[in-house]
Amino acid sequence: MLLATGDLPEACFRRYLVQDYLFLLHFARAWGLAVYKSDTLTEMRRAQRLVAATLDVEIGLHIEYCRGWGLSEAAMGSEPEAPATIAYTRFVLDRGLAGDRLDLEVTLAPCVIGYAEIAAERLDDAATRLAGNRYREWLEMYAGAEYQDLAREAAAALDEQFARRGGEGRFSSLAAAFATAARLEADFWQMGLEAPR
Amino acid sequence: MLLATGDLPEACFRRYLVQDYLFLLHFARAWGLAVYKSDTLTEMRRAQRLVAATLDVEIGLHIEYCRGWGLSEAAMGSEPEAPATIAYTRFVLDRGLAGDRLDLEVTLAPCVIGYAEIAAERLDDAATRLAGNRYREWLEMYAGAEYQDLAREAAAALDEQFARRGGEGRFSSLAAAFATAARLEADFWQMGLEAPR
Amino acid sequence: MLLATGDLPEACFRRYLVQDYLFLLHFARAWGLAVYKSDTLTEMRRAQRLVAATLDVEIGLHIEYCRGWGLSEAAMGSEPEAPATIAYTRFVLDRGLAGDRLDLEVTLAPCVIGYAEIAAERLDDAATRLAGNRYREWLEMYAGAEYQDLAREAAAALDEQFARRGGEGRFSSLAAAFATAARLEADFWQMGLEAPR
Amino acid sequence: MLLATGDLPEACFRRYLVQDYLFLLHFARAWGLAVYKSDTLTEMRRAQRLVAATLDVEIGLHIEYCRGWGLSEAAMGSEPEAPATIAYTRFVLDRGLAGDRLDLEVTLAPCVIGYAEIAAERLDDAATRLAGNRYREWLEMYAGAEYQDLAREAAAALDEQFARRGGEGRFSSLAAAFATAARLEADFWQMGLEAPR
């Protein structure tokens, strides 16, 4: 992975950063939808925490981090969404509205949990080089304790919801939605790689 | 049951007929929502048949039937919805949007399947008097083969969806939603009974 | 108004308090829906503040206040929703999903803005008696600066959205939805008055 | 345009046909959503006609037409959706749920009305060659009176809804959503062109 070795062209990373900003706006909408789709106060409060984590923490940190790469919030906000950004975000929202909250969270998982898995895996990899790697901060953020905790909590919430709303009959449909979401998440990364350099 | 003996005051039945017209409009919306929430062409076609059954058959028959009671479509359309009509229809639509299609159909069941059960039960009851009963046509419509088939098909669809999307974990939540819907359905009838005579 | 004179039977107020707790849960869901329905970060943040105002402040204060009336959160949470509670909350959510965010906020207005208007009007009324009135705290909360500000902000947000998403063509439909919501809000109060004493 | 001259490689057209089948399933869901989002019986019936036009006519004709190209329904149904198919269809559904019915129909317009415009334009173009063109039937279907009528009706419905639910304040937001939808529609065609040959 080019991020982990520091060999990713900067133009690719900038494209990724801009689209990730646009992505996060819809991510926050998805957690707002989860507030609506909650059955209990406890469920609502968890969704609310994730709206806040996205709007107050993630987007805030992202804007600050992007400034270090010469990208202002206004500039990012005026960029058109890439088709890959639209495809993943709207797929999630449609699954979330057509299905129930479990359908919604399953399609969010490749993003929420996937980032944690990939970052941890990269840091454990012998080929990863942190010294002098301009993407180090980014890698350490997602491999760090705070994000890893959030991902673990998301995985636990999925298990809890599967027990309460799932059942073996749903497994194949949930797995198919997860697979599509994971494919769209990969396309999102690929869109960065294909940025004109 | 006063309908079955023919002893129901006509003002109550008229009130029920007007509100049932308003109810059916939202019932059709619920089946439109089921088209949206379908995962397969087969599911979509079943929901489409129920949109058509509501808009083309039920509402059509209802308007014609009401004309016999001196109620024009325009007059019914300009009546305000009773709170009991709003409560049941919007409860169904909200469950259907917050949950998945199984949640939607479970809350529709007290209406779709309930009418069939009640009408059949009435016709079997010794106290029921058809001769000279001005509600006879209404009772026979819901006890008739066509409507009974529709209700049986709805029950089978619920079972099929429970196998595919359900699981024991969902049972208590589905049962609670069904119970609330059944209570709101009963309130809907009660609203008719409480019409000023 | 019996609250303002202190003459409201306590059983009525208790019934109102329990149902208002159940109401607030769906009110928070409505603001979660508004996060989903937002077009900009600014809109999202306003909706998020209202989710937080409901879940962190209103429900919190309500639970504490109800404890003073001998009502525990667990007891309130296990009460069934009254038809009037279901009718108003689900009407709002359905308008919010069938229409756009302006439709949603217009149907919330009788509650958000209505409480502020009514409380202020009561305090200005010569017939209102605060000394020894066991509902004084409740009246002063909604007539107080904090709530009055929130209501003014809600009215300004409606105006701003009407400029951006409205147009004269929408006025009659918005007015009709507002009128229905206001009627359902009044029914909600009436439900308290009709509590068995 | 390669279709109009008959120079389009068949592999591209086959890819387009398969994805168009998958597209139509979500298109039918969008019209089901329009049934739900209808305010009047007239609006509901128009949406219902479009569900029927999609499920009974378009998908039916498409399956039959594809058979002539050696593509069975089962084969098409088991293909994964291309990102371009997901992006356009889910963008439409999300706009339709986040906004009102006008938002929904505006994002459907590049497809419904766009096909009619493009086909008519192609048939009028001197460079178009019908004799021996294996895409002739396809061109004539969308340029034909039946489809042209459907598109004209859709344009009239947009105008009518804009008068009723629009207003100048909405214009820029609707135009932006239309522009994104048109871009995603173009990407959908491009996805066919980029099929491995």
Image (cartoon, coloured by chain):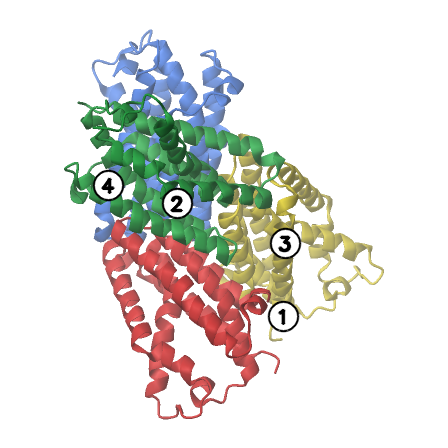
Chain colours: A blue, B red, C yellow, D green
Q: Is residue A75 left or right of residue C123?
A: left
Which numbered mark, 3 or 2, is in the foreground of this view?
2
The chain letter under disc 3 is: C
> Which is nearer the eye, D67 or B124?
D67
Q: Kindly identify the residue that appears in the image at 45 percent across and 23 percent down.
A: A80
Q: Kindly identify the residue that appears in the image at 44 percent across and 26 percent down.
A: A22
Amino acid type at circle 1 is Ala
Kindly tell me whether residue A115 is visible in this rendering: no
Q: Is residue D35 left or right of residue D193?
A: right
Which of the image's four quarters has the C terminus of chain B?
bottom right
> Which is nearer the eye, C106 or C89?
C106
Residue on which the image places disc 2: D30
Could you tell me residue C160's position as x and y percent?
65, 37
Does dot 3 land on a helix, a strand or a loop?
helix
Which numbered mark, 1 or 2, is in the foreground of this view?
2
Disc 3 with disc 1 on a shared chain: yes
Could you tell me residue C78's position as x and y percent?
47, 63
Amino acid type at circle 2 is Ala
Amino acid type at circle 4 is Ala
Does dot 1 land on a helix, a strand or a loop?
helix
Residues at marks 3 and 1, CA–CA distance in whole angstroms? 30 Å
Q: Is residue A53 left or right of residue B167?
A: right
Which numbered mark, 2 or 4, is in the foreground of this view?
2
Q: Are marks 2 and 4 in contact (CB under 8 Å)?
A: no
The chain letter under disc 2 is: D
